[in-house]
Amino acid sequence: MPVATQASLKGLTPEQLAATGCRLCLNNTYHLGLKPGQAILEALGGAHKLQSWPHNILTDSGGFQMVSLLKLASITEEGVRFLSPHDGTPMLLTPEHSMSLQNTIGSDIIMQLDDVVVTTSPDHVRIQEATERSVRWLDRCIAAHKNPDRQNLFCIVQGGLDTDLRRYCCEEMVKRDTPGIAIGGLSGGEAKDAFCRVVDTCTSMLPTSKPRYVMGVGYPEDILVSIALGADMFDCVWPTRTARFGNAITPLGLLNLRNQVFAHDFEPVSKECSCLCCLPKDKGGFGITRAFIHHLVAKETVGAHLLTVHNVTQQLSLMTKARDAIIEDRYPSFLRKWFDTRYEASEIPLWAIESLRRVGVDLLSTVP
């Protein structure tokens, strides 16, 4: 899912976002609750109308702000007290208020309010407290949710890097029988092998009939390995953020188009890409060259806009190819080909090799 935190994907109109193939984007409850605020959202009829987006929206509950805005927040059993980053106004976000906001926003998938602790925290007591509190807060979210017939509430599994806590949390969350289940609290600086161990632990305990959503994951390697471990959904700001720094996602890795070498490169950003930026004019695209992007980067915002279109399209295309490979029962060979294209055999990350071996995929095998 592309991340449109404040009901806008930076640099793109809703029509441009839809043209990338996106049919589900993420908004943030905390930020929309501050601005434009619940009263305006209610008067408008929700976030779909606010951003003129006819497709699906998932709203994060605001729990992640416990980590990202920790200096502005204090956490108790009641909820989370924030100071607005806009004007310093106090705000109390409880499970009930998070549900009320998300019901007003009208998102198609809504997330429980969870207690989030950064994975690198050494405070095991605090991690256990947050895990148990997230279960209690889910019960309060379920009780407060007013539109279960049209808004799908996902629970969020917490537990840091402690696989026993993760197992406990999975057991409790599965009992609540929510329409989907998220694995939260990752992508906080932990080692990749620890990340994979947590994902594998959780997905092995979650029902296969419900979507499993690993929150905050966006690097292609992380996504593809997580899919092999049993995950279905992902979100991250990385594709759009890296575009604003002049970086293009390609099948061979990142291209830093700020580099002088691209000043005389008149090829498209990626020949294999079907986005409007890369397609030639005779095929309905803009026919943009690497040289033009190089010229624009750090000077004109349109450069970031064009790379955002490209990067979002690349990520969605990768997910489509992965889905097709699964349906056609060739995902292991798809993985081997993808890593072979991107890396020399000696350079494939060890964490990816070992994590995939645990689920029967050998990246170093020559078997097609």
Image (cartoon, helix red, strand yellow):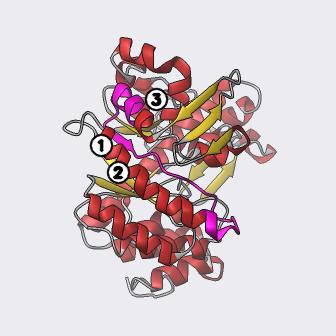
Cα separation, mark 2 vs mark 1, equals 6 Å
Q: Which residue is mark 3?
A: 281
Q: Quadrant of the C terminus?
A: bottom left
User: Badge 1 is on which residue?
Assistant: 143
Residue visible at 65% across and 43% down? 74
* Quarter holding residue 102: top left
Q: Secondary structure at mark 3?
A: helix
Q: Nearer the viewer, mark 1 or mark 3?
A: 1
**Residue at horizontal 55 percent and vertical 30 percent from the top:** 31
Q: 143 left or right of 161?
A: left
Q: Which range of residues does the magenta coloring cover?
A: 99-126
Q: Which residue extends farthest right? A: 260
Q: Position of residue 268 (x, y in %)?
A: 57, 42
Assess whether residue 165 is covered by the magenta stretch: no
- Mark 3 burial class by Cα count in 10 Å: few <14, some 14-19, many 20+: few
Give the CA distance from mark 2 to mark 3: 54 Å
Give whichever of 91, 294 is nearer the camera.
Answer: 91
Residue 240: horizontal and vertical position, in percent? 58, 40
Q: Amino acid at mark 2?
A: Asp
Question: Percent x, y for residue 65?
Answer: 60, 42
Q: Name the quadrant of the N terminus.
A: top left
Residue 43 is at least partly visible in this image: yes
Quarter where residue 334 is shown: bottom left
The circle drawn on residue 139 is 2
Q: Is disc 2 placed on a helix, strand or loop?
A: helix
Give the mark nearer the N terminus: 2 vs 3: 2
Name the residue: 65% across, 77% down: 347
Q: CA distance from mark 1 to mark 3?
A: 54 Å
Residue at screen point 38% across, 27% down: 105
Image height check: is 30 above or below 312? above
Q: Is residue 90 above or below residue 290?
A: above
Check disc 3 and give the amino acid type: Lys
